[in-house]
Amino acid sequence: MPRAQAPGMSAPALWRWTAAPLARLGLSGRTLVILVPVIWLLVFFLIPFLVVAKISLSEPMIAQPPYAPLGTWDGLRLTLDLNFGNYAFLLDDPLYLNAYVFSIQTAFVSAALALLIGYPMAWYIARSPEPRRTLLLLLVILPFWTSFLLRVYAWQGFLRSNGVINNFLIATGIIDTPLVMLQTNFAVYLGIVYTYLPFMILPLYATLVKLDDSLLEASADLGARPVATFFHVTLPLSMPGVIAGFMLVFVPAIGEFVIPELLGGPNTLMIGKVLWGEFFSNRDWPVASAVAIVMLVVVVVPFMLLRNAQARAEAE
Amino acid sequence: MTSQVAATLQKPWLDQAENPFVRIHRVTKKFGDFIAVHDVSIDIYKGELFCLLGGSGCGKSTLLRMLAGFEEPSGGRIEIDGQDMAGFAPYDRPTNMMFQSYALFPHMSVERNVAYGLLREGVSRAEARDRTAEMLKMVQLERFAGRKPHQLSGGQRQRVALARSLVKRPKLLLLDEPLGALDKKLREETQFELIRIQESLGVTFIIVTHDQEEAMTLASRIGVMNDGEIVQVGEPVEIYEYPKSRFVADFVGSVNILEGRVTEDEANFIRLGCPDIGAEIHVGHGFSCTLNQTLWYAIRPEKIRLTRERPEGRHNNAKGVVEEVAYLGNLSIYRVRLDSGRVIRATKANLSRHEDGAITWDDPVWVSWDDTAGVVLSA
């Protein structure tokens, strides 16, 4: 009795019509799997990056779009007109250098604070019994279910002169005049640490939960007090999580725009704000692009150096 | 006289005046409702190599962890070298432990693993280096000092763990299934290595194992545990030849246990009526019991003789048919189904390479044993 034909295409038929012709073109399944993300990165990362790099080398002009073409083609002759003036301009005006330094400083301090706060939290979650662990992790990521913008606005309500914190402190008689918290660098640090803390906790948790209890016991057995065990065993073994968490906070914090805009004051000059100003207020796309390219280099180069150092340490 | 002194020197547990080095007194450990260790008392003497033997979940590892300080007893007292250990953290105890998983620090080289305990103790770097080197030499790993644990074989890791636990010269070394992960050949070598190290350093060892062969080879004394309790403590020979209960007889080595009722109770012999073998068992020594009391008779396979003819002058014998033969090289195991239906295990050493007319499958045979070969058990 012949077997009933399955609805749709059977697996061999599927193979005959899709994979087989591709295989004839020299595309194996493995290549196809890799090809998809490669095309994605190409279209949505590399090409836009090249466009921005191209704009950063052109002359600003009042037109649509607001920059001069990079070169001319008169039918026989290609003339390239590369303008490095935008980069020179960044070096000229201390505003940009200050913004870079301040951004990196802010991101670094915020990441360090997030590490100090996040490590004990991650440790506590990792050491909790199984069912409670799931609940605590859920609580860590729960804020993401509310809009990020809304949460930063909410901080305004807390930090304002007549906000929740000041009202409480005045009502309890601890202070007479309200503290200035909003529009300060303190508020920016607070906002960044608050927003990015889960990105610190999750990778730390992932490494700490894998930490073998018997290693901690072995350390204690060999005479190490808890503090010594932490610095000699726990911390070195959780370094991958520390580095990952630090990078996940540090990198986005450098280019952060919303938090300094909403919580910072006039003197919180972060590079994201400068970029916004150049692009939308000044409509100087070439300089804005140069700012973006320099920022990318500033972030990517140390990151690559770190990765290299890590790879070398692992190979040893 | 002198020989007796020598004997007590080697067997301090026989000397009433000797103070135990480790005193476990009525120790109990509960996890919630579960009683992991129940009312255990053991005295262990200086220089002993004491094995805690038992199946998984019998509480032997919990007992070891209480000695190391990782668990606090729910009741009872642990003394080491005359000092009550209650409230002492692991890092304040004169013990070191070799973990079942070895627990080597993966981010440190072999040398740093071994030196770790010394540096935490405040020993100078130079001295730590010398003592580490000396220890690595003892376990023959000098050449691997710079390697990381994941670059070593199982046997090498096991030796690093041993070196790390010995380098601080602990008064008491605790070993949790130390040879579990090794193959048979390596295990045998390491067993003798452990005994050599233990004798040359004079450290007291407490070893936890589920492997009765390992316990027999290593131990000066064995403590057999079952369900959180100590069921018997004794030298390997005692445990094997004079088990006190069916559990011990069955757990240590292989045994045939026959149930019987006392039919004759005399000063120098007793007889047990045993429907299992369809005959009476004659026991060549007295035993405090009453007529008709149910007792068990444990007889080891190697003490049973197989013959084609009915043996003469032997009280204990029964007729049957060979059901199975397992050839192990050095010996063969026979399963004989008696006429009563009961199966008896017997072993025979293979003394020659080829034997004409050897007993084999389906042969009718007689099993027999001396009247002092088995043990009478009341529990």
Image (tube, rainbow, N blue to C red):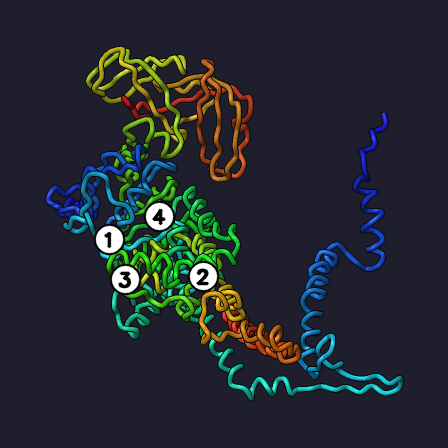
Residue B149, numbered circle: 2
Amino acid at the residue labelled 2: Pro
Which of the two discs, 3 and 1, sits closer to the camera? 1
Amino acid at the residue labelled 3: Lys
Q: Which of A228/A132 is in front?
A: A132
Q: First in sequence: mark 4 or mark 3?
A: 3
Q: Are marks 4 and 2 on the same chain?
A: yes
Residue B37 in the image: x percent, y percent? 28, 36
Residue B168, numbered circle: 3
User: What element does badge 3 sit on?
Assistant: loop
Amino acid at the residue labelled 4: Asp
User: What element does badge 2 sit on?
Assistant: helix
Residue A100 in the image: x percent, y percent? 51, 78
Q: Which of B25/B197 is in front?
A: B25
Spatial separation of the CA atoms under disc 3 and disc 1: 17 Å
Which of the two discs, 1 and 4, sits closer to the camera? 1
* Mark 4 neighbour density, 10 Å: few (under 14) some (14–19) many (20 or more): many
Spatial separation of the CA atoms under disc 4 and disc 3: 18 Å
Disc 1 marks which residue? Answer: B89
User: What element does badge 1 sit on?
Assistant: loop
Q: First in sequence: mark 3 or mark 2?
A: 2
